[in-house]
Image (tube, rainbow, N blue to C red):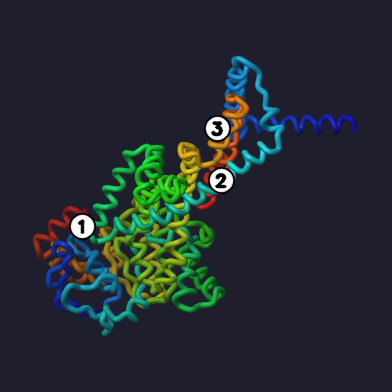
């Protein structure tokens, strides 16, 4: 009885040792140490702070937590709207670029060059405070978000371009040869491939949008960053608010990037 | 097969084919050879109905290759397998049979199995093209061409992207297909394969047919062009 237990323990121990010396186990170790390094750095930072941290007056107040969650919700919402808007606009730009009408090609080219040279935050303020008023200043938030959408659309255009060009001329020839109808070509061959190639860079852009949406605070749009600015002005707890804000952004973007990696693996050709 | 090519020219930026004429009867394996850019790929693609001649006519077994029905009965193997990359080897075949030949999924699956087995791919069926070797992918592509049960199979440099070992693997598989009673038109750089397999050879240079005849013409070239070509490929 006792000896079987001992041998079981020994077996289990052996299995753990085997796992840890395997490639996977080494990987696990590496990641644990990387996390530990960052944790120690964080601990050092907190230890060096001029005062100890107080989260009670922020996280203990249900009205503030609701306020934060609303801001977080708006961050996600505005990011989704920007994703959708820039996808539509990006696709239109892609079509204009492919058009045989030279004016359209030039228009896309000039626009792309301007966007590439503009910081995101400048795009937002210019849309909200320069271009918006020219249209009667209907809604500052609308123009600010439109700025974000416009900023992202050339990048989305590139995503479509590379995804669609990934289907070779010869594949189209094969589709013709076997006699697929247009619908069948798109349904069974073109779209499934485009979706796969499209997904990772699309998710990447989504992550850029989420991070970029924080800039909407310059027009006082009540997304997450703005919400924390307002909490700061009431509580004066600058360190804590920045800390919570950072963690909350990571809680959106890290799962997203992990999902992207998962999809990339699962859908690879 | 009966081949009748009359005054065929093809212009694509520059003239690729210039007034090509040839009429053949009774041959079952026709090899087209020549240096790159001699127009042989264009010729085989036009014979398969994949590209249209700028002028002239091509008839295969009495049917104009521009007839949309003709293309449905053509088996074509491309240079780089050209399988749909998001589908498994088997699905590459069943999708075509189900959607364009109105087969039930069961019939399609059975047919796909049959042809993949012929090409010795029984254990690779469920893999995607990127997960198999170039030779296996090219054999799957041959199985795909066979699956629509064509009378003639066109092969456009099927081994140009393969190393010598995989080239042999693919060409041996093609030779085995002769037992199926199929007819072949192929472009290749592998002269030993032409000599073994072809019963007629067409040599092209600069968009024209320079020499044509039984494979023995390769050993006894009548023109400077073929002689210099043969000295380079050997």
The residue singled out by tag 2 in the image is A74
Q: Give how far apart the Cα atoms at labels 3 and 2 are.
A: 15 Å
* Up-down relation of residue A25 to residue A178 (above or below): above
Residue at x 85%, y 32% (from the top left corner): A5
* Up-down relation of residue B233 to residue A51 (above or below): below
Residue at x 31%, y 39% (from the top left corner): A117
Front position in the image: A103 or B199:
A103
Q: Is residue A22 left or right of residue B76?
A: right
Percent position of residue A257, x then y: 53, 42
Could you tell me which quadrant the N terminus of chain B lies in?
bottom left
Residue at x 59%, y 24% (from the top left corner): A239
Q: Residue furthest front?
A: A136
Q: Residue furthest left?
A: B224
Q: Residue furthest bottom?
A: B62
Q: Nearer the viewer, mark 3 or mark 2?
A: 3
Percent position of residue A144, x then y: 43, 45
Front position in the image: A95 or B45:
A95
Q: Nearer the viewer, mark 3 or mark 1?
A: 3
Percent position of residue B139, x then y: 42, 62
The residue singled out by tag 1 in the image is B36
């Amino acid at each position: 009885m006792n000896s079987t237990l001992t041998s079981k323990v020994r077996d289990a121990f052996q299995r753990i040792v085997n796992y840890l010396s395997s490639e996977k186990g080494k990987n696990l170790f590496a990641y644990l140490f990387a996390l530990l390094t960052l944790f120690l750095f964080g601990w050092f930072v907190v230890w060096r702070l001029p005062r100890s941290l107080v989260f009670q007056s922020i996280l203990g107040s249900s009205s503030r937590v609701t306020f934060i969650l609303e801001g977080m919700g708006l961050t996600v919402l505005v990011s989704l709207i920007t994703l959708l808007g820039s996808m539509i606009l990006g696709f239109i730009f892609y079509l204009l670029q492919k058009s045989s009408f030279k004016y359209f090609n030039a228009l896309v080219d000039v626009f792309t060059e301007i966007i590439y040279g503009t910081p995101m935050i400048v795009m937002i303020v210019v849309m909200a405070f320069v271009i918006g008023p020219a249209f009667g200043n209907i809604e500052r938030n609308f123009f600010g978000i439109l700025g974000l959408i416009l900023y992202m659309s050339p990048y989305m255009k590139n995503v479509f371009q590379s995804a669609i060009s990934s289907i070779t001329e010869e594949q189209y020839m094969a589709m013709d040869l076997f006699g697929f109808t247009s619908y069948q070509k798109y349904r069974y061959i073109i779209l499934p491939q485009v979706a796969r190639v499209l997904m990772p860079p699309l998710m990447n852009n989504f992550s850029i949008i989420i991070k970029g949406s924080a800039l909407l605070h310059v027009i006082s749009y009540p997304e997450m960053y703005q919400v924390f600015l307002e909490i700061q002005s009431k509580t004066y707890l600058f360190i804590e608010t920045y800390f919570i804000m950072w963690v909350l952004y990571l809680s959106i973007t890290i799962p997203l990037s992990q999902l992207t990696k998962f999809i990339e693996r699962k859908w690879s050709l | 097969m009966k081949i009748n090519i009359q005054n065929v020219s093809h212009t694509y930026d520059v003239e690729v084919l210039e007034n090509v004429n040839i009429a053949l009867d009774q041959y079952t394996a026709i090899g087209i050879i020549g240096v790159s850019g001699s127009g042989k790929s264009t010729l085989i693609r036009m014979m398969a109905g994949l590209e249209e001649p700028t002028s002239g006519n091509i008839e295969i077994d009495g049917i104009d290759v521009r007839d949309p029905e003709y293309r449905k009965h053509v088996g074509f193997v491309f240079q780089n397998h050209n399988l749909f990359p998001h589908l498994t080897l088997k699905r590459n075949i069943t999708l075509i049979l189900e959607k364009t030949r109105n087969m039930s999924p069961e019939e399609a699956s059975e047919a796909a199995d049959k042809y993949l087995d012929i090409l010795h791919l029984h254990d690779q069926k469920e893999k995607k093209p990127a997960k198999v070797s170039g030779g296996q992918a090219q054999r799957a592509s041959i199985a795909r061409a066979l699956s629509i049960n064509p009378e003639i199979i066109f092969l456009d440099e099927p081994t140009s992207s393969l190393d010598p070992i995989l080239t042999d693997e693919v060409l041996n598989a093609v030779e085995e297909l002769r037992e199926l009673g199929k007819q072949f038109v192929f472009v290749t750089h592998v002269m030993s394969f032409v000599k073994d397999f072809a019963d007629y050879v067409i040599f092209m240079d600069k968009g024209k047919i320079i020499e044509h005849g039984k494979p023995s013409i390769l050993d006894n070239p009548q023109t400077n062009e073929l002689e210099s070509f043969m000295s380079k490929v050997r």
